[in-house]
Image (spheres, rainbow, N blue to C red):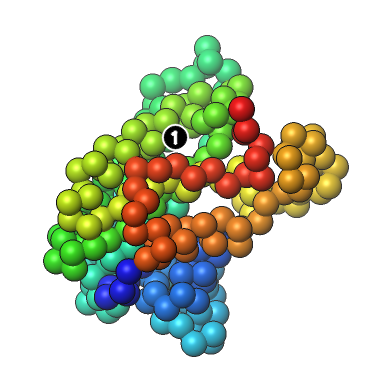
Amino acid sequence: MTIAGSALVTGASRGLGAQIARRLAGDGWPVAVNYHSDEAGAAGVVAGIVAAGGRAAAFQADVTDETAVPAMVAEIEAQLGPVQTVVANATGPQPLAPAEEVTWQDHLNQLVFFVKSPTLLLRATLPGMRRLGTGRIVHIGSDSFERALPGASAYNAAKGAQIGLARTWARELGRHGITVNVVAPGWIPVERHGVVTAEDSAGYVRDVPLGRMGTPQEIADVVAFVASDAARFITGERITVNGGHTID
């Protein structure tokens, strides 16, 4: 796919989002580094990309806000060109709670990131993708959906909704040259997890056929593939990146 526009990565001031932004910039994408409150982190990601010879700019917005998202996309288009690739990575707190304590608000708190935010992003960027005649929408999912982790029912339900959203959009948007896929990592320790020792992860690693934890770079590599021309005939898919942890 010829890069004619920009790539927007939400929640890109740190963690997986930051690594994805760097990886896409390395492939030649002008990258919009979205952040909510971590201005310094976003600035650092942008500075690193520019120092490496890439092009990037930081854009502050709450990607769950119906006014903020289209305003942000308009700013991106003015500075970096139409958004050709969207990586919906931003997330929020993911508290655990037993089934009998989960409230409807708990469900809404997860759906706002994995259904509402992608919907707002699609509505704001679709006109530009249609003008370009091509586009990529990449949802960042989780293998927690298969693992059905106890206490994570609200999170897992929202991740299931995310899959349905992506598959339906893939059918609807294919005629516009737009692909829609989900990249679903396993447990990838990043800043928000704090210090994760070998002892902390030993139980998890025992069930991973490849025998180790994954890295943010490995997730970013798969996102970069899905956003590239090499994946031009892949849509409506969910690619799980977890070293085989959820092999049936």
Q: Is residue 118 visible?
A: yes
Residue 70 lies, with reference to residue 145, above or below; the image says below
Please identify the quarter of the rendering in which residue 44 is found. bottom right
Residue 76 locus on image (x, y percent): 28, 71
In the rendered structure, the answer to whether residue 22 lies left or right of residue 191 reads: left
Residue 164 locus on image (x, y percent): 34, 33
Residue at the image point whose x is 34% and y is 43% from the top: 236
Residue 114 lies, with reference to residue 126, above or below; the image says above
In the rendered structure, the answer to whether residue 40 lies left or right of residue 72 reads: right
Residue 14 locus on image (x, y percent): 55, 62
Residue 129 locus on image (x, y percent): 21, 62
Where is the C terminus found, in terms of image quarters? Answer: top right
Residue closer to the observer: 43 or 155: 155
Residue at the image point whose x is 44% and y is 27% from the top: 157
In the rendered structure, the answer to whether residue 194 lies left or right of residue 139 reads: right
Circle 1 is placed at which residue position?
159
Q: Amino acid at mark 1?
A: Lys
Residue at the image point whose x is 40% and y is 58% from the top: 231
Residue closer to the observer: 244 or 190: 244
Q: Residue furthest top?
A: 100
Please identify the quarter of the rendering in which residue 206 is found. top right
Q: Residues within 10 Å of mark 1 (few under 14, many from 20)?
A: many
Count every numbered label the image shows and give the total. 1
Q: Secondary structure at mark 1?
A: helix
Q: Is residue 90 visible?
A: no
Residue at the image point whose x is 37% and y is 51% from the top: 234
Where is the N terminus found, in terms of image quarters? Answer: bottom left
Residue 53 lies, with reference to residue 161, above or below; the image says below
Please identify the quarter of the rendering in which residue 219 is found. bottom right
